[in-house]
Structures are given as structure tokens and as C-alpha cells.
Image: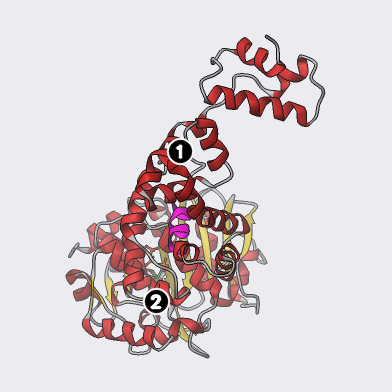
Amino acid sequence: MSAPAVDLLERLRAQPGGEQLLAAASTGTFLVGGAVRDLLLDRTPRELDVVVEGDGAPALVRRLGASRHPGAAAAPEGHPTDALAEPSPTIGPAVVEHPRFGTAVVEHPRFGTAVVELDGARIDVAMARRERYPTPGALPEVEPAPLAEDLLRRDFTVNAIAMTLHGEHPGELRAAPHALEDLRAGRLRVLHERSFLDDPTRLWRLARYRARLGFVVEKHTTELTAAAVAGGALQTVSGARIGAELRLALAEADPVVTLAMLERRGLLGALHPRLRFEAPVVERALGLLPAGDPQCRPDLLLLAALALPLVLRADGDPRAEIAALLDRLEFSAGDRDRVAAAAAAVPRLVDELPSVARPSQLRALALPVPPEGVALAGAVSEPAADSARRWLEDVRHVRLTITGEDLLAAGIPQGPEIGRRLEESLRMRLDGKLPDEHSAQLHAALGLP
Ligand code: ATP
């Protein structure tokens, strides 16, 4: 891990956007956080996080924009990226298409940060700052500060390392106490006692890093996590922020390990006391869900699996309860309804899938349910697994060779009759009573001998 400065610079240069970032950097510009951690571990950073000391961030953003078109000058005064220098009370991002350079910039004026999309790379630019938490769990108030303080406001020591990008010693590292030794040892440690109380989303971040990097958690940090969870720290955080953490966990390369970690640390239970993560069931369900099929969503399967205890020990209206939970976590309406429908369908599928005889019956049972629900039912109950697999891999894809257009052209008037005839023909096709041939299917749909 102890890569010399020149190696680190080369690793950065090899990242998308790295070359342009080095060219655009000026005095007081540092690569920080996960980007430095990942370069030191020789992993690929997901994005490049940059802090600039003083008020140089807007100028860096402009230079990065200009670097896509080397001939172009910096953006004119008054360009929207100047909002960075003039904090406004707005919370949340403003998306700004840079008209002149074709570079998208997303700004968070309140935090003095901007995101630059550059040749497929994402560069997060922020002014070096200190943070103050007005109340536990609330968003912080920020003000400019030297780099050393910016490092100390971070979540874990391994994310509190900065690399100089400009000046006499580019590639040189500056780190919070313990940071380099913790990275070398593969250890996660908070920077101060109140860390999880100030921002309990760090409990989620810890579980994600632990699962992704395979790091251990330093002893005192473990004690602080247990105390924070037991003290109800997560109750101080908005549903939207916890929902964002859950979505990040689901998007990890190995979400199963990540969710298992979250469960073990009591973080899922803090979302809803009945949520459970049963890795063997989830592994079986993911095995049944066709991989790479755009109509199948492993992330939603994981969510439906978490919510299963709400359905299996139902009192009240589990579907509404799941929907209310996902609303609180600010999932989209489409995802919310699909997860609730998938989980709620499991008990009936478990009852009925084992006894379906004909493929047309299988279709009638499974079609109204999202594929994630069918996979879960097959994972929960061994007798349901065969039918679930048959539906997901085969029966779901069977189509007729004729369409409504064929029936219209043959004189069937527009209306529900067309759908009814197609559905009946598909039933026959599924049950092996119709060949795959176009004319035979058309004859059957038209009721001809
Ligand atoms: P990833 O690889 O998941 O992108 P990352 O470490 O780059 O991980 P980001 O969420 O991109 O994480 O955040 C960038 C950096 O900002 C982190 O490395 C950390 O230093 C700091 N950071 C992010 N969230 C917090 C937080 N809640 N509290 C303190 N510091 C944070």
C-alpha cells in the first residue's frame, strides 16, 4: 500500500478525468476521501473527491469545464457556477448544463460543493470546510477551514487522507492521526467520540465499508456503534437520508454481505422492528431470478425479502405497511408498489405454485406478480421452487406469433374481443394445443376449423 508519490500520481492520471484534474489543479487543491483511500489500496475510485482551500473551488470547476475543450477560455463571469462563491439558502442540488463546454455541473450551494461530469468521470469539488451539527442527526452548518480541519470532520480515519495535486510536491499525503496506519492495517476507526451521534448515517457507512473492503472495526469504534444504536441515534435522522443509505447498500457490488452486516449491527431493525435479512433465502431467490434480465431487479428482490416477515406474520394490511415504510424512506412510487406487490404475493404463491399442472395455470397465477415475488416464493418453499423456476426461465417468455394487427386485418373489430382471443390462443399455445406456426395460430384465434 505504501505507494510512493509518483506512483499515486500515475494511478490518478490513469483514472478517467485524472489527467484533466491534475492539469486544472492550483495551489491548495487536494484529492481526498475515498479517492485517495482507493488509489492507495490500488482499487478504482468511484469518483474523484477534491477539496480546495480558500475560495478557489469555483475557479477549479470552471477550469475543469474548460478542459474538455482545451481551446476554450474559462467561463465568463456571472456563469451559474459562481453560485459556489455566493452561498444561497437553498438546500439540494441545482442541475446546470454548461452550455458552452457541454459539461454538467450539479451544485449544492449550501455546502459549497459542485459535481463536474467530465468524460464519463465524476469529480466532486468542495471548499475545505469545518462542520457544526446544530442538533444530532441534522444536516451540518459549514464554513471555510484549512485542510487539516476538513480532514477531521470526516467519517473514518481511512477516509481522512489528502493528496496534494499542485505545487512543489504533488502526490504528497496529508492525513488525520492514525489514518495511514489504519489503512495499512485494514481498520475502520472514527475520528472522534461524538461521530455517530453527530451523524448516525455513519453507522450505515461503516457497515458498507466493512463489507466492501473487508476491514475490521477498531475496538473503541465498535463500542461507540453499539452505544449509538442502543441509544436510538438513528431515530434522529430523516427517512430520506436513511433511505439514501439503504439504496447505496443495495447498489454495493455484494449487497448480500452488506445487508447481512447491517442486520448484525441492528441497523435494519432500527428501520422497522420486523425487518429481517435471511441470507440463505435471499441467495436462493437471487439464484432463481434471471441475471441480466432488465425486467428483473435484484435490488427490489432484496427489499422484498427484508419485508417478508411483515407479510408472513400478517396482522393488519402488510402491503400498506410495506408501502408506508418505503414511502418514509423515499423510494420511488414505482419501486415501492413493486416491492409491496412482490412481498405480499409470496404466501399465496407458496400455497398454489406446487400444485399448478398446466403452464396456462402457471401464467394466470404468476403474471400479476413481479418476478421478484415469484423468485422469493420459490426460495421460501422448496415445493414451489420448480414452478417458480419454470415461470421465470421459460413460461414467462412464451409469445404468440400473431398479434392484434393480424386479427384486425382479418376483420375482428377493434375492442376487448381482440385481447380475449389472443389470451385464449396463448393459453392453448402454452398448454401444447397450438403449434408455433403463424397460420395455425391465426386460424385458432379466428375460431376457424
Ligand atoms: P465510495 O467509494 O462509496 O464513493 P467514498 O469514501 O468516496 O466512498 P463518498 O460518499 O463519496 O464516500 O464521500 C466522500 C468522502 O466524504 C468520504 O470518503 C468521507 O471522507 C467524506 N464523507 C462522506 N460522507 C460523510 C459523512 N456522513 N460524515 C463524514 N464524512 C463523510
Quarter of the C terminus within the rendering: top right
- Residue 67 is a magenta residue: no
Secondary structure that dominates the magenta span: helix
Does residue 167 appear in the picture of this structure?
no
Residue denoted by label 1: 392
Query: Toward which corner of the image does residue 202 lie, by quadrant?
Result: bottom left
| Amino acid found under the numbered disc labelled 1 | Leu
- For residue 289, above or below residue 22: above
- Between circles 2 and 1, the one closer to the viewer is 1
Of residues 161 and 207, the one nearer the viewer is 207
Residue denoted by label 2: 202
* Colour convention of the picture: secondary structure
Disc 2 residue: CB within 8 Å of ligand 1: yes
Residue drawn at 47 percent across, 37 percent down: 391
| Amino acid found under the numbered disc labelled 2 | Arg
Bounds of the magenta span? Answer: 298-306
- Residue 305 at x, y = what percent? 43, 58
